[in-house]
Image: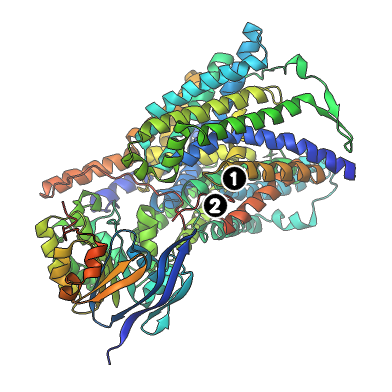
Amino acid sequence: MIAGLSRKHLFFVLVVIAALAAFPYFGGDFRMNQLGLFLCFVMLALSLDLIWGFTGILSLGNAVYFGGGAYFVAMSLKLKYAATNPARYGSGIPDFMEWNGLTEVPVWMRPLESIWFAAPAGVLAMGLLAFVFGFITFKRHIYGVYCAVITLAESVIFEELIIEFQAYTGGFNGITDYGSFSSNTTFYWIILAVTVFFFWLARKITTSHFGMILQSIRENELRSEFFGFEVANYKIFVFTVAAMMSAVAGGLYAALNGIISHQEIGPLLSIEGVIWVAVGGRGTLIGSFVGPILIKGAESLLSEQFAWMWGLFVGLMFIVIVVFMPDGIVGTLLRRARRRRALAEGRAPAYEPAVVQAEETPTV
Amino acid sequence: MASYILEVRDLVNTVSGHTIIDHLEFDIEEGELRVLVGPNGAGKTTLIEIITGRYRPTQGQILFQGQRIDGRPRHEIYRLGISRKFQVPTVYDNLTVFENLSVALRGHRQVFSSLFYRIDARGAGQIEAVLAQINLLHRAKDEAYTLSHGEKQWLEIGMVVASDPRLMLLDEPTTGMTREETDKTARLIREIARTRSVMVVEHDMSFVRQIANRITVLHQGQKLAEGSVREIENNPRVAEVYLGRTKISAAP
Amino acid sequence: MAQAIFTQFLTGFSIVAILLIISLGLAVIFGVMRVINMAHGDFIMIGAYVAFVLQGFLGLNLFWGIPAAFLVVGAIGLVVEWGLIRRLYGRPLETLLATWGVSVVLQQGIRLIFGPELRYVRAPLILDGGIHVPGSNLPFAYFRLFIIILALALLFITYWLLYRTDFGMSVRAVNQNRPMAEVLGIDTRRVDGLVFAFGSGLAGVAGTILAPIKTVSPIMGFSYAVDSYMVIVLGGVGRLLGTVAGAAVIGEAETVLAFLYNNVIGKLLVFTVIVLVIRVFPQGLFTLQRR
């Protein structure tokens, strides 16, 4: 079920990367910034494809790791900005801290002043969080619908926590006004490079024997358990890697966007991520590029005129995709290509395609 | 004195008031091909579930090559050398036949070891040998969902063979098969059983006659009778339990 | 202080009642069909809008809203089940996602019709005021009492429907052993449809009753939905007792902890407790015994 990467495909991939790299020269600053943000979303979608498309773990709360990474970076940049801009920040501390009665940066937050600490710390912290969550959930064979619902609740709670502790997080308004790397071509290329790297990494993982086992878990977890695989370990591993990937994406997003709020950590972004992967194509990797670019791109182009019905359209489209095109755009195309090749080789597939899905929690 | 690959000692399994396995005593010798029969609800599949570690018995012991395995985790029991085929053909639908077998191939079970492994020539050779055995060489590149019911059964049997166990547990390998498919399966199982111990659960008595040396009859969680095919067929208590049912195959 | 905690404990009863009302419909649906309806919160929201329309345009008070919401949202549920859920039979994750799409469509639809502004629905005048309970330091609102009574009534109706009618027997048969029920001649697809409609109708009723508590808006349903999922995860599937237990534990714990610490910490602690309980009882506190 994995597309072979022939010479032809590799050439096509390089063309796409080259086009993306050259984009700043013909797209202009505004669109370049947008594309940079979209690439961060692509990385989020990629991490979701790994855990959902390949392993069958439906997480409705993965934005927690994206937003977590984002907050670490945003906070670091904000602390630096506040300390070095006496004209704006007289007392040298972020505005939301001042509004909440703090007179100086709390001791435990001091290490975040260095971005070289904060960024990796954010990624590791999110990895640890995912590991703990995975350990608690997967070791007890909690998956399917139960897992989805628990991850949803998790993201709701984290969103509320972020809003609640406003002295430390900027509360409902989030962290704003800390300078950013927008309209910076070099930073855009950095984002592009990281995205390409993550795709390479994901491909390495999914084409290895490990990737095959992940798919077997998605197809039939019980069967794999009785073939000697400690399924929980595989899930925990891929879940943790995906979380750290999301955290990096979130950090880059924060640095590019110049503003971060609870929206980057809550259920809405989490579910949006799932929609991107579902539309693009689960278990295809390419789908996680196509999905966000297509949907976010369409949103930015169309929603100016059709803002009032954009939400409705997305909802309907999502229903149609889930019911009639469960493999997503790329997935459906790949399946058709495989069918054609099978027919050409004289092997005629006889039955209807089985939908890529995971089962609900069985009686253990 | 023959050694036993599997020993079941005073096994009891009670679930919410129902006793499914009732003080069962049962042995399989090393290298044997044993067939387990019995009416529905006799506890055959439950026995397999307990042996492979899905359920913990309420009481009793299971010994594999002399070691206790009851209560141990599933992956440990697998690695000791027991592998099973489910009652309903359970394969990986969206993976190809070749990929299905490559997952089942023994070895590289740990996360990190599988991360840095790719199927090598030796592994591919082993898979091709199994494909030849189960007659699915021509289907190697097809996704498993395109297989017919009988072919899926063979695929799963092939997966169990690829996992190279010392004791193979096959739960109803011929359900839904045609007459010819059943005969082919009988030959396949006899071939497989030459190099390892096999326990087959079955309903189809004509199939059982083709493969069995020894039969154990289970009834209401207990061993009702044990012996050769002829002894069992002439056993009046067994006939009574099956209640005048002529030994009609379960196949359509 | 003890009095304050006792007061909170009493208030907790009405929170438990609210949780029960919003979870009952989903519990019945999930119990029979193993389907999580992500649009459940929006069914509640539509029930609230039914009350708003009745009150604002027809001058009818909340009591009329109850049967009206049941019928309206029940009908919507029937359409959703027939048009969508049915096609995704046996694929619970797909169904979850598809119903999320329904949720978005409903929210956007309501927003297009009524606008995004907050709306207000008044409780019936007859329920104004409160009763003084000895030992507590605040009067117990009649409206809250009404909610508790209604929760018990709905619980009783659901119980009666499931355990004292032929239809209920079919439902329970499908719940416990679907293939066997089919073999026995029960039209399981029809049962699914009616169960989904009934559960949706209950959600609608919940929305009507809760309309005076929170302001009515297109997005009001989401938090209710998440609460109801937690009740089901904790309480377990297939037994009404589980839903009651789940609602009771979460409702009381959240109320008391919110009072002692604050709202968000309370929720976090309750969530942690739920996750820990699930480790020990992966199927929830009360489940059907299965072989």
The three-letter code of the residue at mark 2 reads Val
Where is residue C33 shown, x and y percent of the image? 44, 39
Q: Which mark, by number, is residue B131?
A: none
The residue depicted at 16 percent of the width and 48 percent of the height is A342
Q: Can residue C16 be seen in the rendering of this structure?
A: yes
Task: Measure the alpha-carbon separation of dots 2 and 1.
Answer: 41 Å
State the residue in front, A282 or A100: A282
Question: Where on the picture, by quarter, is residue C135?
Answer: top right
Residue underneath mark 2: A248
Query: Mark 1 belongs to which subunit?
Result: C
Amino acid at dot 1: Gly
Q: Residues within 10 Å of mark 2 (few under 14, many from 20)?
A: many
Figure quadrant of the C terminus of chain C: bottom left
Q: Determine the secondary structure under disc 1.
A: helix
Instruction: Looking at this view, name the residue that lies furthest to the top.
Output: C58
For discs 2 and 1, the disc positioned in front in the rendered view: 1
The residue at which mark 1 appears reads as: C242
Chain containing the residue with disc 2? A
Please state the horizontal and vertical placement of residue C21, each as a whole percent of the image: 62, 32
Q: Secondary structure at mark 2?
A: helix
The mark tally for this picture is 2
